[in-house]
Image (spheres, rainbow, N blue to C red):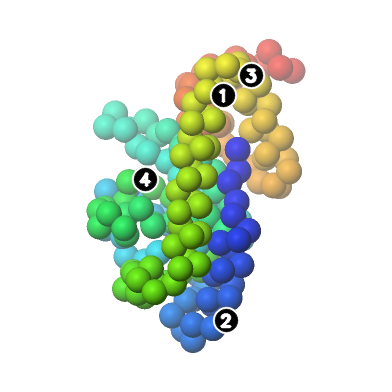
Amino acid sequence: MLRTNQEFLHYFEDLYNKAGGEVVIKSFSRDENILTQGRALSRLMLVKEGVVKCFLTEENGKEYIVEFLGSGEILGEVELIKNIHCLCSVQAVSEVRVYETTISYFKSLIQKDLTLNHLLLDSFAERIINTSSRASYQQLYTVEHSLGQLLTMQENEGIQISKEDMAAYLGITVRSLNRILKSLK
């Protein structure tokens, strides 16, 4: 439900301490946009603290939340590697702090740092596994069960997720969400 990556977080903490200004810390307020779907990537980031939502906006204006990401999750690596515009938008769900670096610096690290390459491969593999698991989970379990897990994550992380975001994550309408919430009470 909330993805984190402590190994990647430790890697960026070390990089921040050793890189002499190549890696900076930037803060975002709740609901602030971090990356915007369809726009050019300007910097690569890794979540230091907080929770973000990664979402797609369809042509009809509806949002679908792909994932909630927490500490140690990297943002913009696919776009950087494929040299494309942002596939998804990323927005802060809570107060968020990220490690941020330039695209050119990150590309230079990819060329010479085997540890970084292993972390990226592991991150890609983990995301494929999580996507497959989520797809099968949604087929096998009820929306009520998924909603219960989402509410537990919200409580555990001390964050407030709007009904619109819950519905977007579950792939249902707000009206359907309200019916389910009412039946759970």
Q: In which quarter of the image is residue 144?
A: top right
Q: Mark 1 points at which residue?
A: 137
Q: Earlier in the sequence, mark 2 or mark 4?
A: 2
Q: Which amino acid does label 1 sit on?
A: Tyr
Vertical placement of residue 150 versus 6, above or below: above
Horizontal and vertical percent position of residue 74: 48, 57
Q: Earlier in the sequence, mark 2 or mark 1?
A: 2
Percent from the top left, x then y, of residue 50? 61, 56
| Residue where numbered disc 4 is placed | 88
Asked whether, in this view, residue 174 is left or right of residue 147, the answer is left
Q: Which amino acid does label 2 sit on?
A: Asn
Q: Can residue 118 be seen in this view?
A: yes
Q: Based on the displayed image, in which of its 4 quarters is residue 59 positioned?
A: top left
Pair 1/4: label in front: 1
Image quarter (top left, top right, bottom left or bottom right) of the N terminus: top right
Badge 3 density bin: few <14, some 14–19, many ≥20, Cα 10 Å: some
* Mark 1 or mark 4, earlier in chain: 4
**Picture coordinates of residue 179 (x, y %)?**
60, 14
Relative image position of residue 39 (x, y in whole percent): 27, 54
Q: Earlier along the polypeptide chain: callout 3 or callout 2? A: 2
Query: Spatial distance from mark 2 to mark 4, Cα to Cα?
Result: 30 Å
Q: Are marks 3 and 4 in contact (CB under 8 Å)?
A: no
Inter-mark Cα distance, 2 to 1: 40 Å
Pick the residue in front: 24 or 17: 17
Q: Do the residues labelled 2 and 4 touch (CB within 8 Å)?
A: no
Q: Is mark 4 on a helix, strand or loop?
A: loop
- Which residue, given by chain and number where applicable, does mark 2 sit on? 17
